[in-house]
Amino acid sequence: MPNMSLTKNPMPSQDPVERASNFKEVALGYTKEMALDEAARCLNCKNHPCTQGCPVQISIPEFIKKVAEEDFEGAYEVISKDSSLPAVCGRVCPQENQCEKYCVRGIKGEPVGIGRLERFVADWHNEHAKEAPVKPASNGHKVAVIGSGPSGLTCAGDLAKKGYEVTVFEALHTAGGVLVYGIPEFRLPKSIVQKEVDGLKALGVKVETNTVIGKTVSVDELMSDEFGFEAVFIGSGAGLPSFMNIPGENLKGVYSANEFLTRINLMKAYREGADTPIKHSKAVAVVGGGNVAMDAARCAKRLGAEHVYIVYRRSEAELPARREEVEHAKEEGIEFKLLNNPVEILGGEDRFVNGIKCIRMELGEPDASGRRRPVEVPGSEFVLDVDCVIMAIGTSPNPLIKNTTEGLETNKKGCIVAEEATGKTSKDMVYAGGDAVTGAATVILAMGAGKTAAKAIDEALSK
Ligand code: FAD
Ligand code: SF4
Ligand code: SF4
C-alpha cells in the first residue's frame, strides 16, 4: 500500500541560528526510517515521467523500489548505471526543476523526495561499501582530461574503467572544480568530493594539480609525440567572473564571488593561520540572485557580518537560485533587497568600500529571456551602508585554452563549440563538455557531458 501523504518527509537540518555561525553541513540527511517512508510514496508509475526530467535518465522508480525493499546497495547499483556522482547530485541537483518537477505525486501535493532518497542511498553506500575499486588492465591508450570538475571527473572515471590511461590536469592545488572551490562545505562536504577523487586514483587515474593548460603545457603539446595523448577532453568550466563595469569596482573590499568563495571553501580562510586572508566585514552586499549569490551571502554571514544583503534587480519570483537555498538563506538572516540595482560602489579616502549606491527598479515588458525586464525608477537612488561588495552576476569560460590551442572553435560567448551527442570539437580528437561548452550550468549536466564524451572517445580510439 503506497504512503499517500501529500508532503515529503522533511529533511532534518541544523538549527538556523546555530548553523549561521558554522560551516558544517546544513541538511543532515534522511534516517533509514524516513527513507523507507518516503520511498513508499512512489507509485512506481509505468511511464515514470520523473525519469524524463533527469538529464542523465536515472531509472528512478527502479531505484526507489529497491529502497522500499531495503536493498540499498541494489538501489545504488541502479543509480550508478547513469550517474557517477550520486552523493553530490542528491545534494545539489536542482531537483525541483528536473526529476521532481515531473513526478505525478506533485500534481496534488509534494513530489516524491527523489533527490533526498538519492542522497540517502549514496551516503549509505559510502558508509557501508567495503570493496575498493580495482584498477582494470591497461588497453594502452592515453587520454588527457583538462579540469577536475564534475565533467572531467566523470569522463576520467568512465575511461579509466575501460582500461584507458587517464591523466587529469588541474590548474588549482586540489581536484574537484566548483565542487571544492565554489559550493560551500555547508552544502557539500568536501570529504564527499575527495572520496570521488580517491576512487578515480584507485582506478589508476593520475591527477596532476597545479598544472595550467595553456601556460604550463598546451593542448597541442599534450597531443605531440613528447606527451603522446591520443585524445583530450576539455572540462575547464566557466570560471571567469563578470563585473558590472560601474564606478568603484576596483575599491578595496570588492570581490568576485569566485574569489570570495575560493578563499573560504578551498583555502579555508576563516580558520586561524590560513594561507590566504579574508575580510571580516560588518555589512556585505552581494549582487546577484543565483545559487552563487546565495552561497556567497551565507558564507559572509558565517564570517560574522551583522548585515548581509542580496541586491537583485528583479523580484523574488525571478530569483534564479534554488528555492531551498533562498529559504535557507532567509532562515539564516540574509536580507533581500529585491528590485534594486547597484549604480556605484562608494569608497573613502583610504580606498576601502564604505557604501553601495543603488536605484530602485520596477518590472516592465518581458525581455528575450522571457523574464520581465527591470526598469529604473527615476530619482530613487539610495545608499546601503556596507564595507564589502561581492559581485555574483555570472561567469564565462576563461579564454586561455582557446587562445593557446590551434583550430579550437569557440562561440561569441567564449564557449567551446562541441557536438551535443559526442562532445567533439572542431579539432581532431579533442572533446569538450560541461560549463566550458554550455556556459555556467549545473553539476548533473556537466557530469552527463563528461559521460557522453568518454563514450565517444572510446568509440574513436577502439576503431
Ligand atoms: P568546473 O566545476 O568549473 O571545473 C573546471 C575545472 O577546470 C576547475 O577545477 C578549474 O580550476 C579547471 N581549469 C580551468 N582552466 C584550466 C586550465 N587551463 N588548466 C587546467 N585546469 C583548468 N550546480 C548545481 O547543479 N547545483 C548547485 O547547487 C550549484 N551551485 C553552484 C554554486 C557555485 C558557487 C558555483 C560557482 C556553481 C554552482 N553550480 C551548481 C554550477 C556547477 O557547479 C557547475 O555547472 C559545474 O561544476 C560545472 O562543471 P565543469 O566540470 O564543467 O567545471
Ligand atoms: Fe534527480 Fe538529479 Fe538525481 Fe537526476 S541526478 S534523479 S535530476 S537528483
Ligand atoms: Fe514515483 Fe513520482 Fe516517478 Fe511516479 S513519477 S515513478 S510517483 S517518482
Image: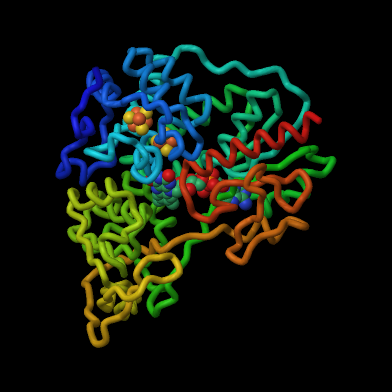
Give residue 243's quadrant in the image.
bottom left
> What residue is at 27 percent from the left and 65 percent from the top?
315
> What residue is at 52 percent from the left and 31 percent from the top?
197
Q: Residue furthest bottom?
A: 379
Specify whether 357 is left or right of 137: left
346 or 242: nearer the eye?
A: 242
> What residue is at 38 percent from the left and 34 percent from the top?
90
Vertical arrangement, residue 380 with respect to residue 264, above or below: below
Specify whether 50 is left or right of 12: right
- Image coordinates for residue 42, horizontal then vertical, percent: 31, 26
Vertical arrangement, residue 435 with respect to residue 389, above or below: above
Q: Quadrant of the N terminus?
A: top left
- Image coordinates for residue 56, horizontal then vertical, percent: 51, 36
Dividing the image into four quarters, tell me where ligand 3 lies. top left
Give residue 246's quadrant in the image.
bottom left
Vertical arrangement, residue 100 with respect to residue 64, above or below: below
330 or 113: nearer the eye?
A: 113
